Image (cartoon, helix red, strand yellow):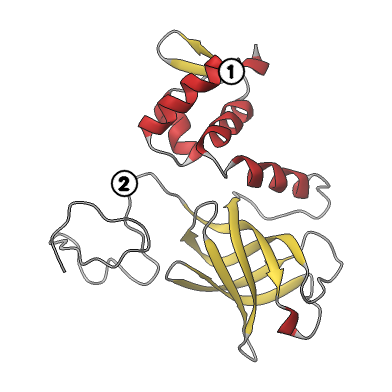
Amino acid sequence: GRDTDLARAGECVALKMADLGSDEAGRGSVLATPGFFEASRFINARFQLLREAGRPLEPRTPIRFHVGTSDVSGYLILPSLNRLAPGGESYVQIQLQKPVVAAPGDPFVARSLSPTFTLGGGYVVGLDPKRIRRSNGGWIEACEEHDRAFRQPGTALEYVLRHAGLRSLRPAEAAHAALVDEKTAGECMNQLVREALAVRLDGDRFIHARAL
């Protein structure tokens, strides 16, 4: 081992945090800049059922959800009442008993409760403030749009500006919503202005070009 001032997700490091009690950091805890991440009980995701699962997945299936070091029980909800065949893929919503921290692109694994075996896995698309409503016919399309946008910082920021509507955003606000650092947000916002996708307003605020 060696001393370092920088560590990235996935690396094994030891941190000295003298002001943190042992009961304040449990399994699934995430170390991040305060306010950068939010925890949620509702997670939209792309999921693939393993062929080895042997039988179709029910529209509402109890699971153990593993993302990062979190292990939380909940339900995997399909967007329709049709079952998912082994080997099939679908956008789904994970509804958990307690909130977890997850970000777009984070891989996860879903395991059945009884008997215990791996059902499949996939990646996080985004957090949702509310439960899925199957009567909402645009849910899958909204997931697809969010999924495509958050694969790159520039497209994530364009998505954030577009969905802000008439509300202008400072780079720091857009960076928080797009889950990127402020330096990257500033560079991407300037590029969006050059591409005529965004407009810079007084006070270093930005708005999507469609809103004007």
Residue located 54% across and 51% down the image: 104
User: Crowding at label 2, few (<14), some or many (≥20) Cα neighbours within 10 Å?
Assistant: few
* Residue 98 screen position, x and y as percent: 50, 66
* SS class, disc 2: loop
Left or right, 173 with reference to 162? left
Left or right, 151 with reference to 170? right
Q: Is residue 121 above or below residue 39?
A: below
> According to the image, label 2 marks what residue?
33
Residue located 44% across and 7% down the image: 202
Q: Quadrant of the C terminus?
A: top right
The amino acid type, in three-letter code, at marker 2 is Thr
Q: Nearer the viewer, residue 96 or 150?
A: 150
Left or right, 110 with reference to 92? left
Residue 46 sits in which quadrant? bottom right
Report, in whole angstroms, how far the alpha carbon at label 2 lies from the one at label 1. Answer: 31 Å
The amino acid type, in three-letter code, at marker 1 is Glu
The disc label shown at residue 195, or none: 1
